[in-house]
Amino acid sequence: MAKERSEKREKHDKKEKKEKRSETDGVKKSKKEKKDKTEKKEKKDKKSKKETKAAASGSESGLDDEGAADASALVDVSMADVEGANGEAALTTVPVGLIVPFANPLADDADSKAVLKAVRHAAKHSHLKRGTKEVVKSLRKSAKDASSLPVGVVILAADISPMDVISHLPVLCEDHDVPYIYVRSRVALGEAGATKRPTSVVMVSAKEKKEKMDAKELAKWEESYKELVRMVRKAQQSVRV
């Protein structure tokens, strides 16, 4: 019994010495101190979250105001003539971005409607080349024609960015005696060309090898093409150098 008591006392003494050493060295902390520290940390976290949320809401409101100002300054709205399901013309608003500085000649609203109508007609009868690669390929293959009608008419979107995508096309058109004109919206040009995406450039071709039209449709198409060429050449006469 005496031996067991002495062993218990030794264990108790060792425990006390260990606790005293921990308190002296600052290793052990009481439960109260731990609780206080946890509460302080939670309060600090809540405060920082509130400040972050307030700053975010303030910046968002500022951005909204600035965004609205920028949108009104940099984005214009153009009325594009888009055919409905029943074939009737319907006016829809399409976004227009910044116009490239070399967009000459640039079609006005009336001419834009006529140009886009001709593009829709060409797309319907497979007389349309879409995109830079197809247009460049067609231009390089085309030979200079001495007749009154050119091999095609190129329509470019004036709100393309970067502008280098189409900057080489006007010179290429002039080298092959192909008239060209700019419209304000790549979105409207894509819709007129029967594509789901905005289009930078299209080429309305005068003839296609695999065209299948009856005499009435062919006569209508030729008249439409002649009118397009006449309008574009007239616009090119007023080009500012």
Image (spheres, rainbow, N blue to C red):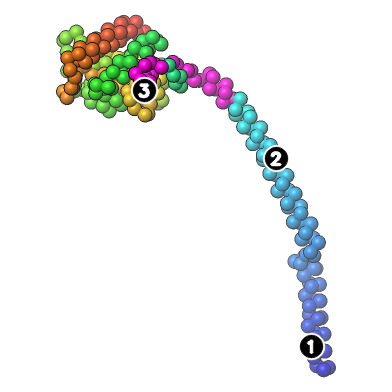
Q: Along the line of sight, which residue is nearer the eye, 158 or 165? A: 158
The crowd level at tag 3 (other Cα within 10 Å; few <14, some 14-19, many 20+) is few
The CA distance from mark 2 to mark 1 is: 59 Å
Q: Disc 3 marks which residue?
A: 85
Q: Can you give x and y, in whole percent of width and height, for residue 85 in the image?
A: 36, 22
Q: Disc 1 marks which residue?
A: 7
Q: Can you give x and y, in whole percent of width and height, for residue 235 in the image?
A: 33, 7
- Labelled pair 3, 1 in contact (Cβ < 8 Å): no
Q: Along the line of sight, which residue is nearer the eye, 115 or 44? A: 115
Q: Disc 2 marks which residue?
A: 51
Give the SS element for disc 3.
loop
Q: Nearer the viewer, mark 2 or mark 1?
A: 2
The CA distance from mark 2 to mark 3 is: 53 Å
* Segment colored magenta: 66-90
Mark positioned earlier in the residue sequence (3 or 1) = 1
Q: Along the line of sight, which residue is nearer the eye, 173 or 96? A: 96
Give the SS element for disc 2.
helix
